[in-house]
Amino acid sequence: MKKTIFLSFMLTLNNVSHPIQRSTADICTAVIAATCASGSLKIWSETHKIHPAILVGVSCVITATTYHWLHQSTPAGRIKRANILLDDVARHTLARVSFDDEESFFDAVQDMYLTDDLPLMSAYNHLINLVATMHYTLSLINTASAEVGKDVLLQEECDASSSRANILFKNISDAIKRIRDHKNYLSQLSIYKESLAQEKQTIAQQQMAYAQYNMAQSQQSSTFLKWLKFIFGR
């Protein structure tokens, strides 16, 4: 029975990446809950070694985890995850704001990365990371939209999220293009690549020094052990 609970639980979680309807998620959760309940009852009746409160607690955790993961794969769950990601991306001024002119855009860059030695590269790297997030967010929205069915309200939510995502993505793309076209971009890129190379060289030297130190320590320990064996081994 314990194997049945475990296999059912793992099978349910393994299917979380595939789109499912809310009714399917509810049914699967109910099946898992029933399986856990019957399994706990059987374990208690056969062994009497585990306190019922522990069995109930484990069953509740498994059921709650199943419910959480399964509902993430429903259209509503995917849109909720997408909106959370969009909220996070929108915190970045260069993604949220559509700048009308170059001057206001680069004033914002300077304000945001005032303490950075290479503000253009800092902004560029941050925006590139946001691009990956936006690709994943759009995939969530598109998958949810394709599985929405006849739920008009949810379809409207999908459309609203899609529209917002496209606006943010356009702002990010425009920002990246503006940075690349800036007269100081290539010079800052060159300095940035040089600093990365120096950083890698420094790390390699530190690793080599650490390896040499460990080797020296090992040799000292070996020598010390040899002396101890020579003195006391007779």
Image (spheres, grey):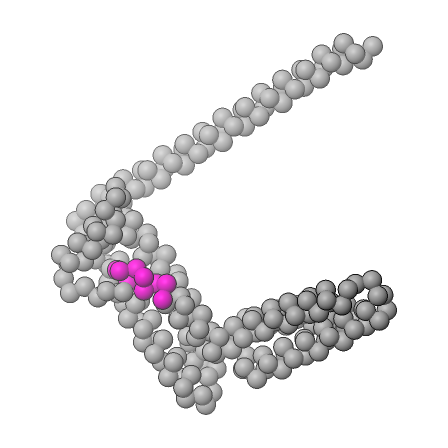
Residue 159 pos. (x, y %)? 36, 80
Residue 60 pos. (x, y %)? 65, 70
Considering depth in this image, is 15 or 70 the residue closer to the camera? Answer: 70
User: Could you tell me which residue is drawn at 27 percent across and 67 percent down?
Assistant: 170
Examine the image and state in which quarter residue 197 appears: top left
User: Could you tell me which residue is drawn at 31 percent across and 38 percent down?
Assistant: 194
Considering depth in this image, is 65 or 157 the residue closer to the camera? Answer: 65
Residue 26 highlighted magenta (yes or no): no
Examine the image and state in which quarter residue 196 appears: top left
Residue 126 pos. (x, y %)? 33, 54
Considering depth in this image, is 226 or 193 the residue closer to the camera? Answer: 226
Examine the image and state in which quarter residue 95 appears: bottom left
The residues colored magenta run: 87-95
Rendered view: 206 above or below 66: above
Rendered view: 149 above or below 82: below
Would you say residue 139 is visible in this rendering?
no
Q: Is residue 89 left or right of residue 21?
A: left
Q: Is residue 63 left or right of residue 73?
A: right
Residue 136 pos. (x, y %)? 42, 66
Would you say residue 195 is visible in this rendering?
yes
How many numbered markers are drawn? 0
Look at the magenta stretch and give its main secondary structure. helix
Q: Quadrant of the C terminus?
A: top right
Q: Quadrant of the N terminus?
A: bottom right
User: Could you tell me which residue is drawn at 34 percent across and 56 percent down?
Assistant: 128
Q: Is residue 155 left or right of residue 225?
A: left
